[in-house]
Amino acid sequence: MPATVDRTGTVPLPRNRWSAGQAPGTPTPDRDGATRTRRARRALPLVALVLLLVGAAGAALYVASSAVEVQVDGEVLTTRTFAADVAGVLDRLDVEVGDADRVEPTLDAPVEDGLRIVVLRARSVEVDIEGRPTLTVVAVVDTVADVLREAGLGDLLTREARIDPAPDEPIADGGRIVVTLPVAVTIAVDGEVLRFQTYADTVGGALADADVTVGDRDLVDPAPDHALDRATDITVQRVEVVEEVVEVAIEHGEVRRDTDELVEGETRVETAGQDGLRRETYEVTRVDGEETERELVAEEIVREPIERVVLVGAAPGPVREAQRLLTDLGYPAGPVDGIDGPQTRRGLCAWRRLEGHPVSRQPLQPGELEALRATTGLPAAPAGRGVTVDKTCQVVYYRQDGGWRFVHEASTGAGGLPRTGSYVIGRTQEGWHTSTLYPAPAPNMYNSLFFHGAIAIHGSNDVPTYPASAGCVRVTPTAADQLFADLRVGDPVLVIGAY
């Protein structure tokens, strides 16, 4: 219990002037030793009167004062006082009151007999809220909740906030209250979005609060050790590393071998090819199910490929050999490809003409291959210089000095022109120009040799194997260069045959 101190404000009674053991009326020695008994006896009535007057005055003062009890700093002080208000009582008792202290009743309250005054001391408490400056609260408070209300932070008592000490705990002067506010967190993981509040300090702590387990390979953004000091969006990507085995076909190659058992152009498969097989092992990384990386970690040849062997005819076929022989002799037989086409037949036709065989555009006939093998070159020709246009074979022969020098492919007129007969070169026109009878958007005649009016032998970029011109004789630009360089005005032109 608080100590009770009696501090009275009454007038103190006078002390007894007699010494202990000495009664009134006892003779007191004078300075000369004479007895003063008679004088003392005469003074007794006067002393009694004085004492009576003083006692009466003290009693009157006591009755006029007020009895007051003051509770302060763990003590209870009692006194009688003539003070008019509470402030006067505290002043008489030397009780100092701070600006934040609370006095009940108030300092200006009047004093009444039996008044009880309570002085409540203010306490200084620090409030530390995460992310804010430290707040010092000086007030008359008993609990943590009182401090927060005094600081205007009473809403924290109803919010999701962590308060240490607890709100209902008592608080002492110089105490400290720590308030931790939750952080709003959004976690995107496993195709879901989780939203909640956490008191965790880091991303990793928030994930633990949300019961989100993170594997060693999983990707977390921000990183798990990232501090949580504000609302944060967290993304967790699941990383899975698996082993995948893939079988890959090894394409077989092809080997071609010449053989005289087959003629040129013929082939035969000697060994059928077979693809090989390779087994590849990959380490595959998937992030949220999507493949992001693939690394080859092992491979094994399960089956070697078997090459395909193809026999290729090395013995020339009759058509191919005929094409090669005709080309070597100087006849326009087209490419040496073994295909019996119109170009090959044009060359055969011209060869038959100059060698004196029956003239036709027929395919290679029996016995002709042997005859071609026996031919050594272009045969002899009439003396002098000139050209022969062969409408049957669609060629132009050039002769000089008793021999046939060139056989050029040609295309005569579609209407049977020029007519068979003997002509001479009447005029020439060098370079590219346009026909006066059949003008074209672009020049269509080159190095022209006119031998019958507007009919000429001239170069063209289009020389098919059949009659296609309006009446002239088309030859290639290369042939036109040779003929224009060697022939002169007055040289003969012979037109023979029919298509």
Image: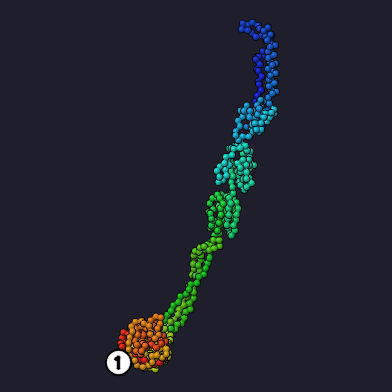
Residue 150, horizontal then vertical, whole percent? 61, 40
Give the residue displayed 44% in from the left and 84% down from the top: 266
Residue marked by disc 1:
383
Direction from residue 483 to residue 279 in the image, left or right: right
- Residue visible at 30% across and 92% down in the picture: 383
Q: Nearer the viewer, residue 247 or 11?
A: 11
Crowding at dot 1, Cα within 10 Å, few <14 / some 14-19 / many 20+, comes out as: few
Total labels drawn: 1
Q: Quadrant of residue 256?
A: bottom left
Residue 228 on image: x %, y %: 55, 50
Position above or below: 49 against 294: above
Q: Quadrant of the N terminus?
A: top right
User: Please, what secondary structure does the residue beneath circle 1 have?
Assistant: loop
Pick whichever, 417 or 435, lies toward us: 435
**Quarter of the figure with the C terminus:** bottom left
The colouring scheme, among rainbow, by chain, secondary structure or one colour, is rainbow
Please report the residue visible at 59 percent of the width from the left and 57 percent of the height from the top.
193
Toward which corner of the image does residue 489 lie, by quadrant? Answer: bottom left
* Kind of residue at badge 1: Ala
* Residue 152 image offset from top left, x and y in percent: 61, 42
- Does residue 470 sit above or below 274 in this rendering? below
Residue 178 drawn at (x, y percent): 58, 43
Whether residue 73 can be seen here: yes
Q: Nearer the viewer, residue 478 or 414?
A: 414
Q: Residue extending furthest front?
A: 436
